[in-house]
Image (spheres, rainbow, N blue to C red):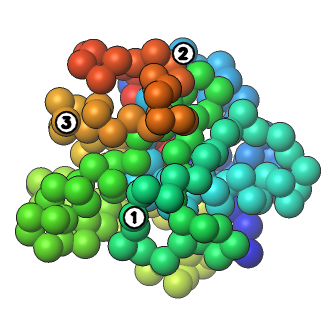
Amino acid sequence: MAAVVSIAVVGGEHTHVFEGPEPQLLRRLDALLVDLPAGVIVTWNGGGFDLPFLADRAARLGIELGLTLRHDPSVLSSRDPLPGHPGVYRGRWYDHSHLDGYRVYRADVGASLGWSCGLKAMARSVGLDPVEVDRERIHDLSAQELHDYVASDAYLARELVTRRWATARLAIDKMAADDAPANGVAANSAPPAITSI
């Protein structure tokens, strides 16, 4: 399993890009999230990849995160599960609920138009300009190229969900069938602090 090389967090007016040794990177991410006001963390396929991948890497390094995951067999994915995992997860990170933007778009845009709903393709379809790189050569990127790439992905996920907040808010993860979102965000509320990773 490859190491995490960079993580971006976009929220409000701020963009944080964490780079450096993997243990330090994971600890800095966790420290930032514990200090942010409760809100919604947006990912793109984060329930199927990003969150369990970060949890696996942290466990392997003996780092505790404020991340809670629960496998949800009712969520079908069009992608293969992360190796060693049964499928898609619901999650929360400290007091932040999680919302997987990929699942939102896949449920309606993907279903009606037959699109795969990849982040870059969805961004281009609404006029956004994603930073694109050859993912096979991600370890060969310069520090600036890597920074721009991960920041772009976090921004795009946040922007796509924010544009669809009226319906996207209904997809905020609940950790059990009868749970409210982790931070009390009601499905009919105005957008809370939305942070993307």
Q: Is mark 3 on a helix, strand or loop?
A: helix
Label 3 crowd bin: few (<14), some (14–19), many (20+), radius 10 Å = few
**Type of the residue with mark 3:** Thr
What is the spatial separation of the Cα atoms under label 1 and label 3, in whole angstroms?
19 Å
Q: Which label sits on residue 137?
A: none
Query: Relative to 77, does residue 107 appear above or below in the rendering?
Result: above
Residue 16 horizontal/vertical position (percent) = 55, 38
Task: State how far apart marks 3 and 2 are (Cα).
Answer: 23 Å
Three-letter amino acid code at disc 2? Pro
Mark nearer the viewer, 1 or 3: 1
Residue holding disc 2: 37
Residue type (three-letter) at the residue carrying disc 1: Leu
Q: Position of residue 38 (x, y in %)?
A: 52, 18
Marks 1/2: CA–CA distance:
31 Å
Q: Which of 172 and 43 is in front in this view?
A: 172
Specify the label residue 76 is tagged with: 1
Picture layout, residue 24 above or below residue 133: above
Note whether residue 148 is visible. Answer: no
Judge from the rendering whether residue 80 lies leftward or rightward of residue 58; answer left or right: left
Mark positioned earlier in the residue sequence (3 or 2): 2
Q: Residue at x 54, y 65 (%)?
A: 87
- Residue 67: name its quadrant: top right
